[in-house]
Image (cartoon, grey):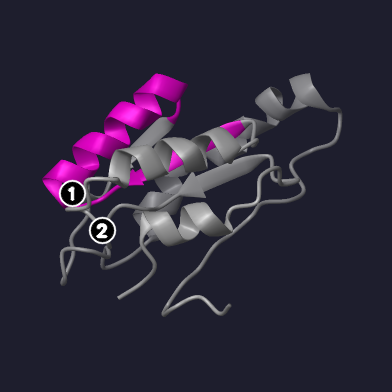
Amino acid sequence: MGAGSAEIERRVSGASPATVALIALGSNDAASPALATNLVVIRRKTTAVRVAWLAPYDLRAASIVTSIAARFGDMVIPLRAQPSRDGIHPVSYRPVATSLRWGAAAPVRAAVAPAPIARATVLMMSGPLAP
């Protein structure tokens, strides 16, 4: 089992040089009563110009993610539209990457700074986070 939103919230320190951010949280703690609060805190710490969320397969968590994304004007990619073997991960992330359409992020970024998108923060977890 990967990290839940509370653990990530504690580890997110704030501003990042990333222009775009993909938030993929909620699957590991879908039943947590603190999920919405944790995700709002994480989103407030996110300084990227463009933010997208993966809405988990779990309907409750997907609803929470979708409402927070709407509150901040962020893009949502529903994982339910993708085949899955375990109900947590899509069989392939290729359709997810395609649906991000981050090639279109360049005009948004240009309004902030003249440089093209050069950096992104990627968080990949396959197990517990190291201290």
**Residue at image location 36% in from the left, 23% down from the top:** 70
The quadrant in which residue 75 appears is top left
**Residue at image location 40% in from the left, 42% down from the top:** 39
**Residue at image location 25% in from the left, 51% down from the top:** 56
**Residue at image location 46% in from the left, 72% down from the top:** 125
- Amino acid carrying label 2: it is Asp
User: In x, y percent, where is residue 93?
Assistant: 38, 61
User: Which quarter of the rendering shows the C terminus?
Assistant: bottom right
Residue position for label 1: 80
Q: How many residues crowd mark 1 within 10 Å: few (<14), some (14–19), many (20+)?
A: some
User: In x, y percent, where is residue 59?
Assistant: 13, 44
Q: Nearer the viewer, residue 3 or 24?
A: 3
Q: Is residue 98 magenta?
A: no
User: Which quarter of the rendering shows the N terminus?
Assistant: bottom left
Q: Locate residue 99 relative to residue 104 in the image: left or right.
A: left
Q: Nearer the viewer, residue 8 or 86?
A: 8
User: In x, y percent, where is residue 78?
Assistant: 26, 43
Residue position for label 2: 29
Give the number of the disc on residue 50.
Answer: none
User: In x, y percent, where is residue 96?
Assistant: 38, 51
Asked whether the viewer can see residue 128, the reply is: yes
Element type at mark 2: loop
- Image marks 1 and 2: residues in contact by CB distance under 8 Å: no
The quadrant in which residue 115 appears is top right
Provide the residue span drawn in magenta. 50-74
Given this view, does label 1 or label 2 mark the residue nearer the observer?
Answer: 2
